[in-house]
Amino acid sequence: MSGWLLMGLPGAIYAAGLVEAWIAIGLTVGQYLNYLLVAPRLRVYTQVSKDAITIPSFLDNRLRDNTKLLRIASGIVILVFFTFYVSSGMVSGGKFFQSSFGLDYHLGMLIVSGVVVLYTLFGGFLAVSYTDVVQGTIMFLALVLVPLVGVFVTGGFSDVGSAVTAVNPEHLSLLPSTAAAAGIISSVAWGLGYFGQPHIIVRFMAINTVKEMKNARRIGIGWMILSLVGAICTALVGFAYFQQNGLTIDDPETIFIEMGKILFHPFIAGILLAAILAAIMSTISSQLIVTSSALIEDIYKALFKKDATDKHYVAAGRLAVLIVSIIAAILAWNPNNSILDLVGFAWAGFGSSFGPIILLALYWRKLTNIGALSGMVVGAAVAFIWGQSSTLSGIIYEMVPGFFINLIVAVVVSLITYKPNTEIEEEFNHTLEILKEEKAK
């Protein structure tokens, strides 16, 4: 979860009503299935398949792609869509400083970006993991505290409901009369994206044992449900409070910030504002780590240096982080960019590119390197073109066509090009055996 959780989602609920909560519902179901279906098998399979440490390297090893085209294509997809994703975090940072302190949007964006880039450059994966624990805790407490105090200040749940429905009777409806089926399908389809998010599923690869997956799932989903409900309630309570007091808001995506400043003593408000920074920073750092890995492990090593020293690769990785950060900052320079739109575009790109391929690689023996490459390229292209077209994206979220066209292409091409491979069969069977043993412990 990124700044989207504390800014993008509350802003969407504030502006359009509870119908936007279908995104949260789709994400929760998608992440639960991700923990259930992908996490255990990916953890074991990446170990069996030559200890892969990135998604592209896993696919390369799993499918015995001697051409390296699959690995390079995966790295390019990660590079393109993560640049947009990182830019959404930078937009969140700019809006945060502008709304909280009245600073210039661009100055705020550069401050947040600079701090994250620095600790990512020098701390690496372990630093990102440790800071995520602290940042996740702050976010959770903030998303529980703000709506609870907000409900008390506005007079209780009934008064909140009355104030909201007085403006729009359907603002509290999951199925308003104006909602189109395609719009609801588009929102729920966000859940499909979880299967293909490199910065999320790479954490499954890093967990100690399969046995720990159950606790990870309980903690992760419990945190997620409470946090999403908190974000939704913050928007609705904020809507009610602003209506009761005749206030207006320039940017709905800053409603959490405004409520924090209104409801609490400046010291407490400062901690709540830190929750937004925590959300922004934790996600940007995760994305920069994965992007750097993709550039170095999956593109640079495949095309150029293969026998350089570790020191050389560390320096190259840091340079990659800087380059991606600069490009993302250029994309984020426009203060009118919507956080939700940027996140949605990148999310669809990854879900459409990697989601079906990860599922097929883990559960289907007959997936081939050509099938995976074809599906990935087509899925990425469909998501990119569809998402850039206001006409097409207005019909349905680009995740839907991108994901399912990828799935169809990958299956059809794999069936045409499949040839039995003893090594692949042995790895697949060995993975299933280890999973069975781990679950029996």
Image (cartoon, rainbow, N blue to C red):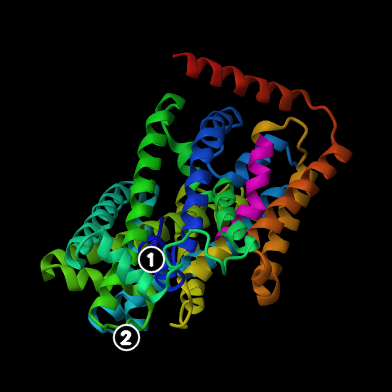
Res 206 → quadrant: top left
Label 2 CA crowd tier, 10 Å (few <14, some 14–19, many 20+)? few
Which residue is at 47% across, 57% downward? 287
Task: Report which residue position mark 1 lands on.
Answer: 10
Which residue is at 48% across, 14% downward? 440
Q: Which residues are magenta?
A: 347-361
At numbered mark 2, what does the secondary structure look like: helix, strand or loop?
loop
Residue 250 visible in rendering = yes
Q: Is residue 12 magenta?
A: no
Q: Is the residue 217 above or below the residue 124 in the image?
A: above
Residue 305 visible in rendering = no
Q: Is residue 358 magenta?
A: yes
Identify the mark at residue 104; answer none if there is no mark: 2
Residue type, label 1: Pro
Res 255 → quadrant: bottom left
Image spot of residue 108 (x, y percent)? 32, 78
Question: Separation of disc 1 and disc 2 at Cα?
Answer: 23 Å
Image spot of residue 115 (x, y percent)? 31, 67
Identify the mark at residue 320; answer none if there is no mark: none
Q: Is residue 200 left or right of residue 391?
A: left
At numbered mark 1, what does the secondary structure look like: helix, strand or loop?
helix
Front position among marks 1 and 2 = 1
Q: Which residue is nearer to you in this view: 202 or 88?
A: 88
Which residue is at 46% across, 26% downward? 210
Q: Is residue 278 left or right of residue 310?
A: left
Q: Is residue 180 left or right of residue 331?
A: right
Quarter of the image that includes the N terminus = bottom left
Q: Main secondary structure of the magenta part?
A: helix
Residue type, label 2: Asp
Res 352 → quadrant: bottom right
